Amino acid sequence: MKKTKVTEIVHKPLAEQVIKLMQSQINNPKKKWTKPFDSKFGRPQNAKTKLYFKGVNAMLTSFDTYFNKYKYCLYATKKQWASLGNVPKPGAQPLPIVFYKPMYEDSKIVKDKKVLSGAILLYSKSFNLAQTEGDYTPPVFKAGKQYSVDAIDQFVKSTKVDLRHEEEGRCFYNETSDYINMTSKINFKDTIEADATVHYYSTLFHELTHSTGHESRTGRMKKNADKYKWWLTDNYAFEELVAELGSVLFGQQFGIEKTIRDNHIQYLNSWIKALKHDYTLIGDALAQSQKAVDFFTVK
């Protein structure tokens, strides 16, 4: 991703926060670095439009809500809050929310017609509900229990990805044969971080994200192999980062609080090194993980 004023303002601080949490995980393995994505805050949402934030904006708002101990992950611009009856509190510091502004030029084929020529990455200044005051009443957020396990199972089935249970004790995605293997649910245990059900589905979402990288879907894996040669000889660490973030995004949609898989802790040092080398990598990983989720959820 190209470095610009916007990436400096948005992606760099986010990368620094991720590094901080990853380092904390290494120093204290019992503390999960994915805690900012706790579903108790509600799915990241614009208070005015009711639209859910995606990609980097979902992560920006989740981290901001977590670190500042806000009750809700609800954000809007000053103008949007005004239309809802609220105003930012004196001294409130806004959070940058990125968006692309399309650019048009005269068509070389059709007279007096404008055609899309590109887009500029910009950002707006948004405030969390806790940073405002007024008459706005937030919606009641329900925890993940409102989603049945059957609903998640039906969603995974609708993706038509081959899901097998052939190798006990192992969960993986086989790119060559294009299938996911999940060990039996009885092999997932309750822990301090989450119960067995959450562990199972967050792992399944991780592998489902991997499957979107297949050449018959987004083709992400082959494209990244050359792009990240400076990181590893086979771009697997980057793919793991995309899959972990994809699992978080899938989890937010189904009320599942993501917990990092123990066997992925080995990648933390690699991710930290890579982010320090190029902080815009977090933006690329988030964009690719959102595209992975959208592949199965946006029709």
Image (cartoon, rainbow, N blue to C red):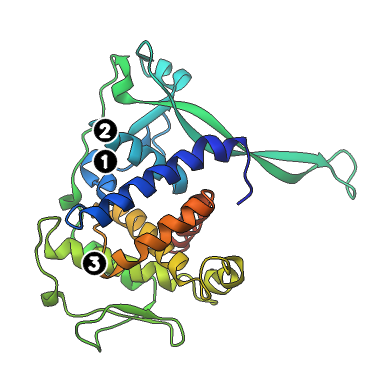
User: Residue, x 43% and y 24% (percent of image)?
Assistant: 94
Task: Determine the image quadrant of residue 68.
Answer: top left
Residue type at numbered disc 2? Tyr
| Residue under label 3 | 262
Task: Determine the image quadrant of residue 73.
Answer: top left
User: Residue, x 29% and y 19% (percent of image)?
Assistant: 136
Mark toward the viewer: 1 or 3: 3
Q: Residues within 10 Å of mark 2 (few under 14, many from 20)?
A: many
| Residue under label 2 | 72
Residue type at numbered disc 1? Gly
Residue 126 in the figure: left or right of residue 124 = left
Horizontal and vertical percent for residue 169?
Answer: 20, 82
Residue 207 is tagged as none
**For this rendering, which residue is in front, 57 or 228?**
228
- Helix, strand or loop status at disc 3: helix
Task: Determine the image quadrant of residue 166.
Answer: bottom left
The correct choice, above or below, for 101 with respect to 1 in the image is above
**For this rendering, which residue is in front, 224 or 140?**
224
